[in-house]
Amino acid sequence: MRVISDTVRVNQPGDPGQVRLDRQDVWAGLLRKAANAVPFVAGIVECAVVERSENGLVREVVFQGGERVREKVVFEPEWRVAFHRADDRVRWVIHNDIGEDEAGELTLTFRAELDLHDDAEEDRIAASMRTGYPAAMGTTLALTREAVAARSA
């Protein structure tokens, strides 16, 4: 099993022009990303919610290259969105967590636990996640800032 993790500060200190996000803003952005990942994750070309529940949803996503997968998405309000995939080929759990660093600043953490039956394929997917998900976190925060700015205008 591979574990990939990356944490970024939500608000950059010393950037007075940046729209500051609070926990509720980031949570709203993660919920939007869960429902439609296409604008947030470059490697996802289609995303459709097939079922909703009180604490999550089931979605079908299509990755570049055409792979279609089903993910169960679980919401832990204002803290975590967890994406679960378990099929013949791959098992993964991806967490998007809202937290705070030692200085009390808001953070967003991506953590993936990946388990494939093929080591070479696991290497490929892990490498893709290592490069793709930091970009997705940046896009998530940027799109969330745009939504907050539009609400304030």
Image (cartoon, rainbow, N blue to C red):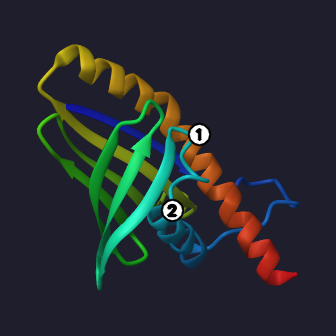
- Direction from residue 115 to residue 70 in the image, left or right: right
Above or below, comparing residue 45 to residue 103 in the picture: above
Residue 93 in the image: state x and y as whole percent: 25, 49
Label 2 is placed on what type of residue? Asn
Mark on residue 36? 2
Q: Nearer the viewer, residue 96 or 69?
A: 69
Q: Residues within 10 Å of mark 2 (few under 14, many from 20)?
A: some
Q: Give the farthest residue toward the top.
A: 120
Sequence order check, earlier mark of 2 and 1:
2
The N terminus is located in which quarter?
top left
- Direction from residue 127 to residue 42 in the image, left or right: right
Q: What secondary structure is marked by label 2?
A: loop
Residue 33 in the image: state x and y as whole percent: 51, 62
Residue 37 in the image: state x and y as whole percent: 50, 56
Q: What secondary structure is marked by label 1?
A: helix
Residue to which mark 1 is pinned:
135
Label 1 is placed on what type of residue? Ala
Residue name at image x 55 percent, y 45 percent: 136
The C terminus is located in which quarter?
bottom right
Residue 44 in view, yes or no: yes
Residue name at image x 48 percent, y 71 percent: 31
Q: Give the farthest residue toward the bottom.
A: 54
Residue name at image x 55 percent, y 52 percent: 38
